[in-house]
Amino acid sequence: MIYHSAFEYSYLWLPLLGLVIGLLASVIGGGGGFFFPPLLILFFKVPAQIAVATSLAATLPICIVGAAVHYRNGNLDLNTGLVFGIAGILGALGGASVTGLLTPDQLKTTFGVYSILLAILIIMNQRKEKKDKKSKDKSIRSKVLKWIPRGSFYGFAGGAITGTFGTSGTAPVLAGLFAIKLPLKMVAGTSLMIIFINTVSALAGHLVLGVIDLTLVWFLTAGTVAGSIAGPKLTTGIKIGNREGFIKQTFAFIVLAFGIILIFT
């Protein structure tokens, strides 16, 4: 169901939040979309199901612009993206169905648990990522019987998380791309393509099965469109270097804090 809620002055903060998160996503990737649901739930008192659907709509510009830039630069593997994406469609639609079965409090608590697990996963993978960057990337994608089932599993998991919680589902997607040993330079662009497919599918599921507040969508998306366009321009030529680990750790602790707050409020 689609509807327009009454305007509230607090909604004027939404474009600014969308702009900041859109810029942030240029640095940390698809994870930028994680922040929308908890912000809407905690600070704007939006019911969890509506926050999930609104987050999906607001994340689309980030995915579209990011994937387009990587495709233009040759850093996107279409075949791999399609395998993950097709499986992700099924997961996203299933996740949207699960969201409709939960009460707002149950969904909020479940999202909190997911946030804590995601934060722990990010922290634990820090050392592994450093080792992966130092090693040479050798693709096993030619072994079709091995990587397609594995890629489908991770794609389905990413889609399910996207559909259920309204986030990008980046963690399982990246885990799957690393598992099939996709060349590192292709990971970022391909993951954004997969996240885009998952987001569109999940949003379609919520249009049919859930509730979408277009007032929230317009305000928040206005900011993410600006942020997703300005982000690549502002970050061009910026060398993150040793700060990459610090950025990811900071992101992990913020995710952890959101998870704890969602569970106990």
Image: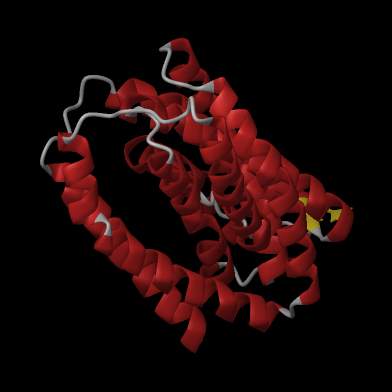
> Hey, which residue is sitting farthest bottom in the picture?
264
Where is residue 251 drawn, in percent x and y?
31, 57
Q: Residue at x 55, y 29 (%)?
A: 80
Left or right, residue 177 beside residue 215:
left
Q: Is residue 209 visible?
A: yes
State which quadrant residue 102 falls in: bottom right
On the question of residue 1 being in view, the answer is no
Q: Residue at x 65, y 83 (%)?
A: 105
- Residue 57 is drawn in which quadrant? top right
Front residue of 13 and 164: 164
How many numbered callouts? Answer: 0
Residue 260, x across and y down, in percent: 41, 80
Front-most of residues 192 and 13? 192
Which residue sits furthest left?
A: 242
Residue 43: x and y in percent read 52, 69
Q: Looking at the image, which residue is at 29% across and 27% down?
A: 235
Which residue corresponds to the image point at 38% horizontal and 41% vertical from the top-left? 178
Q: Where is residue 250 drawn, in percent x and y?
A: 24, 58
Q: Is residue 230 above or below residue 213?
A: above
Point out the image quarter for the N terminus: bottom right
